[in-house]
Amino acid sequence: MITQDINKSWQRFKIGLAIFVVGVLLLFLTSHIHIALYYLSISVLLVGFAIAMFGYFGIFIQRFSFIKNKKPPPKF
């Protein structure tokens, strides 16, 4: 599951980032109205952050494994 396709990880990262931005907008626009909206916006923000970081972790693992599996240059 961690070493998935890089495109799925990028898609997950972009979706999480979009949800995070929605959470930030909700925080700035509606949190002063009621305390429940404040906690709702914080929870949306944290869920978006978690999804984005899970996608970024997949991207990081894929790139790290590419570097690890890269062959050294030939010696002259």
Image (cartoon, grey):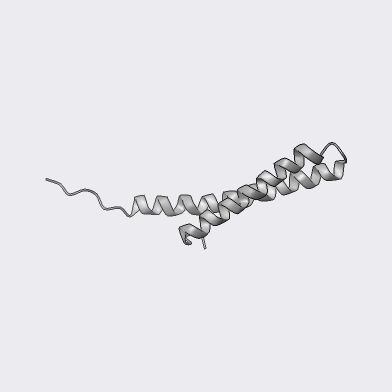
Q: Give how far across and how far down residue 15 sits, in percent.
A: 61, 53
* Direction from residue 28 to residue 12 in the image, left or right: left
Q: Residue at x 86, y 41 (%)?
A: 35
Q: Residue at x 84, y 36 (%)?
A: 32
> Along the line of sight, which residue is nearer the eye, 21 or 40?
21
Q: Give how far across and how far down residue 29 sits, in percent.
A: 78, 39
Residue 28 vertical placement versus 22 (above, below): above
* Quadrant of res 30: top right
Residue 7 vertical placement versus 37 (above, below): below
* Outermost residue to the right: 34
* Direction from residue 12 to residue 31 in the image, left or right: right
Q: Residue at x 63, y 49 (%)?
A: 18
Viewport quadrant of the C terminus: top left
Q: Residue at x 35, y 51 (%)?
A: 68
Q: Give how far across and how far down residue 12 sits, in percent.
A: 57, 56
What count of labels does the image hold?
Answer: 0
* Direction from residue 38 to residue 75 in the image, left or right: left
